[in-house]
Amino acid sequence: MTRDGRVGPSRPISGGPGAMAEGPEYINVAIEPMVPDDGLDFHLDTIRTALLIRRTEQRLLQLFSEGKLFGTVHTCIGQEFVGVAVAQALQEHDCVFSNHRGHGHYLARFGDVEGLIGEVMGKACGVCAGRGGSQHLQRDTYFSNGIQGGIVPVTAGLALANKCRNTGAIAACFIGDGTLGQGALYETMNMASKWDLPLLIVCENNLFAQSTSQTQTLAGDITARAEAFGIETAHSNTWQWTSLMDEMAATVDQVRSSSRPMFHRVDTFRLMAHSKGDDNRPRDYVEPYESRDPLNTMCEAWGEDPRWKAMSDEIDEMVEAAVAKAEASAFDDLKLTTPPPASTGWEPLQFDRARVVQSISGALGEALENRDDVFVLGEDIESPYGGAFKATMGLSLDYPDRVRNTPISELGIAGIGNGLALGGMIPVVEFMFGDFTMLASDQWVNHASKFRFMFNDKVRMPVIYRTPMGGKRGYASTHSQSLEKHLLGLPDTQVLCLHHRYSPAQLYSDLFATIDLPTLVIENKILYGKYATSEPLPGFSLLKQTDERFPVVRLKPEVPADITMVVIGGLSLDAEEAVVRLFEEEEVAVDLFMPTQLYPFDVGVLSESLETSRRLLVVEEGQGFVSLASEILAQVAERHGQSGIVCKRLNASPVPIPAARPLEEQCLPGVDDIVARTMEVMNAPGQ
Ligand SMILES: Cc1ncc(C[n+]2csc(CCOP(=O)(O)OP(=O)(O)O)c2C)c(N)n1
């Protein structure tokens, strides 16, 4: 509380006239803020929650200025009634996805001051033990993330999971008006409307995104955006907060009863800086909002009322107790565990020969048959088309409710997949071409891979992304790339790949049986029409790594190896042909390794072979700069040091992949290139 007893910003807003290039028109300053006629008692719970949010955030700002917070805080001072209205309208099992400005949303739902303050202070007593921090809170079916826009499709995925499981729960997310610039929002509104998802989007329209005024960035009308997708809208404001409570309750009821999305715009104003002290809005621009702030106005009206004082004192005590607890609490430990070393045992490999594409669709069909939590989505995957490469052929006929064509919305469908996973399903998201994963990468990098850890192990993310990479079909620069290197190396993810010497059905059935990490499966366009087979290759044994869920497969020569080769993905076909040629024409015995798991990858699996061969070639279709090949060579260098192993890699030429066949052949590694590069390694002097 400020010295004059008013509840308001605890320190002046910085900046001055002229600091903001272009300010929006005042909105709603003519609206008289509510001091309800029916008095304090009638609205005590609501006011108390709003005041709790304000006092907590004021204390957080104070802690920040005392240097007790690491990072930043985004306060919702001035906007408190939005979170309160949503929390009061929702039922306990409903899901909430909040954003960077989420303290109020969290407190309104749980009243958990200790969990929040502890978390913002980074302490073990925080709701995510300090792993998440201010923007990444999680408890029960409440989540938050600091990526503007990406949370919207994830919330739609939660809504879809609720719908699939008939829970009767809805899912709500919060966005600011600045986030109206994000494509993920529009992809999601489109799907949510088409699919009748019980999704509530609450847009807190506070006129600014960080330092930027809405007048600079927003074209058209806010609610018309949702209406264009056939989504019903509502419009409230925080100055008339009792109406907001009623209107939000009506919105939530409608989402639930209609199982349709709604978009609820709430006009409001952020009284404090965007984060920390970064406010460039002139003081005299903010002041009218401050003096009309509902909590300030009520404090003026009721500040001397003993009931107000008692409530205020009780809140202060609660906040102080939470701060004291957090200050006394320790920081948690990272609890890093060392992964077990790669298995170095080998056993014979045998499986039924099958066309790769049929093996995949068979495995997906089996998963859909055996478990009702599997949900397959992607562009053009329904039959009779059955996917651009036919890997989902027939599935939609047998499981029409759980195999779904989507619009061309890679980011949106990846997010919906993530939400389905958070909601307890096992989603399988197909990206038609690997090139398009780049549009979805935000969901892989900033959502799927982060949730388990930053929510302190309280959630699992069993989401499967599948996609074909690779060229050699004449699809040119944007439909032929092998981009997996951009998606490798994120902790808490795994990246698998198919090749012709391992059964796709086995890989997928093991994946469905064990998945608890976001998993990307790299398929390959050339491979789809070929056979995966364990039929013997004369002069070699076909082996698989023992005790690994997704093993490395090895074609081991019966004679001592001259060179160790690692090949990634669908190039296994070319590599095996090269191995035969090298054996027959050059008398070079290659020990060929074909991983089914690209990340994590431990080169310990190669050690025994390298001890004999002292030579290594890594063959990969993608670009070589900072690639899996370079990772393998780096690990070999670290492990084997100056031991004189001759190492080389073979990757695509450093140009975009051309369309014409002869040009593409020059660009991408093929059998001749593998043979030639192998001979280079063979002829290079060892140390
Ligand atoms: C994808 C993304 N881009 C940019 C940011 C940096 N950022 C954090 S909050 C913010 C402003 C958001 O404005 P708005 O959506 O209006 O919400 P408000 O802060 O007003 O609550 C920005 C640009 C981010 N977190 N995520």
Image (tube, rainbow, N blue to C red):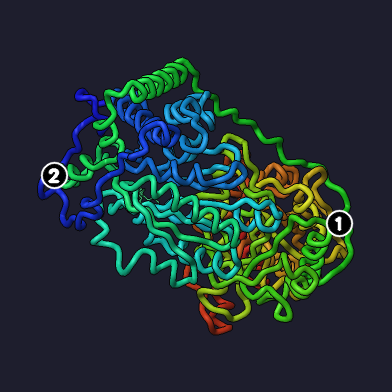
Q: Which of marks 2 and 1 is in front?
A: 2
User: Judging from the image, what secondary structure is the residue with disc 2 in?
Assistant: helix
Residue 541: image tag: 1
**Does residue 230 sit above or below 419 in this rendering?**
below
Residue at mark 2 to residue at mark 1: CA–CA distance? 80 Å
- Please tell me which residue lies in front, 626 or 211: 211
Choose top left, top right, bottom left or bottom right for residue 554: bottom right
Q: Which residue is drawn at 30% across and 39% down?
A: 35
Give the amino acid at mark 2: Asp
Q: Is mark 1 within 8 Å of ligand 1?
A: no
Q: Could you tell which of marks 2 and 1 lies nearer the N-terminus?
A: 2
Q: Residue at x 66, y 44 (%)?
A: 602
The image position of residue 637, as x and y in percent, is 58, 43
The image position of residue 62, as x and y in percent, is 30, 26
Residue 284: image tag: 2
Q: Is residue 91 visible?
A: yes
Q: Does the residue labelled 2 lie within 8 Å of ligand 1?
A: no
The image position of residue 503, as x and y in percent, is 81, 61
The image position of residue 192, as x and y in percent, is 55, 64
Q: Residue at x 51, y 56 (%)?
A: 200
- Please tell me which residue lies in front, 291 or 97: 291
Choose top left, top right, bottom left or bottom right for residue 50: top left
Residue 151: image tag: none
Looking at this view, name the residue that lies furthest to the front: 38
Q: Which residue is drawn at 57% across and 38% down?
A: 453
User: Judging from the image, what secondary structure is the residue with disc 1 in?
Assistant: strand
- Mark 2 Cα shell of 10 Å, populated few (<14), some (14-19), many (≥20): few
**Does residue 469 sit above or below 22 in this rendering?**
below
